[in-house]
Image: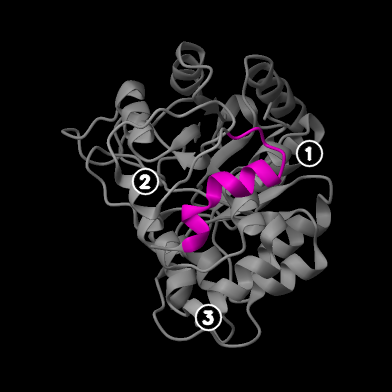
Amino acid sequence: MNLSRREFSKSMLLAGLGCAAGQWSARSLNAAKPNIKAGTGIIDVHTHIGTYTDPKKNLSPEALISWMDEHQIEKSVVLPLTSPESTKYLQTTESVLAAAKQHPDRLIPFCSVDPRTTHAGSVKALVSMIQAWVDQGAKGFGEHKVGLNFDDPLMMRVYEACQEVSIPLLFHIDNIRGKDVPGLKRLENALKTFPELNFIGHGPGWWASISGGLTPKELGGYPKSKVKPGGAIDDLMSRYPNIYGDLSAGSGANSISRDLAFGTEFLIRRQDRILFGTDYLAPGQAVPQFELFEKLELPDAVLSKIYRENAIKLLKLTA
């Protein structure tokens, strides 16, 4: 077992997060329904409810919370999916807000609208729509997973509206959704144009860019080779303070595990802007993040930031 994970409760005490005394082990993340005290558990910044692709695998809010209990996850961000390229079965902002209203101590709602929606065409209209959702409790925008170039004019309207409303935006990049090129130049255009908007990176295209020397095809995949110098993520994080990383899904776990030495150094180097996430979206789904974090040797303070402190600060949560 990983010493850092065994002593995670102690680390949160030292960080002043009010954790009750006790120890976590790596194995405890797979224990059945532990008692999670407020201010002590993980904050997962990427989950979904409803149906994704398989109509036989509907994930209810209650089933999500039961899974959270099994894995020491105190709160989860729930993301709608509103673009036709994002899922077979759309997940509306309204359904996410309703679930969070029923479980306000466990679920954190985000909002989303496809930028091609007719009545959301102007920035003014988008601001009005997004602000109404924020007034109902939405803490961010996403999952922004749209079949357009990342800096398409319609996408840029969404970014402008989110900047005006002052909420972060969680995006997906690959070769189909949020399309970009090696080096993530389209993402950089958005970061530069909207410096007051905090972007949260997710998806194969984002996480493959931990390495340099990518081909366009690799932006849509899960490279297994050792990380090469010149990765766009490090470069962008060095130059733009408004970009964060969501470690969820196979893409997030693969980016660190493909080169564990580099991945560990990366997490330490970018500890203030990395967020724990799983992309849990269907009953029985395998989640590689738990196994990954059992292998990692990270300082307690770094784990505390990744597990919850960064999310609390970015989403303006009550600790």
Q: Which residue is drawn at 77% across and 45% down?
A: 197
Q: Residue at the front extreme?
A: 21
Q: In the rendered structure, which disc, 1 or 2, sits on the residue that comes first in sequence?
A: 2
Q: Say if 209 sits above or below 110 in the image.
A: below
Q: Does the magenta stretch include residue 17?
A: yes
- Looking at numbered disc 3 in the image, what kind of residue is underneath it? Ala
Element type where label 2 sits in the image: helix
- Looking at numbered disc 1 in the image, what kind of residue is underneath it? Gln
For mark 3, what is the residue?
261
- The answer to whether mark 1 and mark 2 are in CB contact below 8 A is no
- Looking at numbered disc 2 in the image, what kind of residue is underneath it? Leu
Q: Which residue range is magenta in the image?
A: 3-19
Question: Rounded to the nearest whole Å, what is the CA distance between mark 1 and mark 2?
Answer: 36 Å
- The answer to whether mark 3 and mark 2 are in CB contact below 8 A is no
Q: Position of residue 318 (x, y in %)?
A: 69, 26
For mark 2, what is the residue?
29
Is most of the magenta stretch helix, strand or loop? helix
Q: Which residue is drawn at 19% across and 33% down?
A: 55
Q: Please tell me which residue lies in front, 94 or 76.
A: 76
For mark 1, what is the residue?
163
- Would you say 268 lies left or right of 77 here? right
Q: Residue at x 15, y 33 (%)?
A: 56
Q: Can residue 96 be seen in this view?
A: yes
Q: Please tell me which residue lies in front, 79 or 276.
A: 276
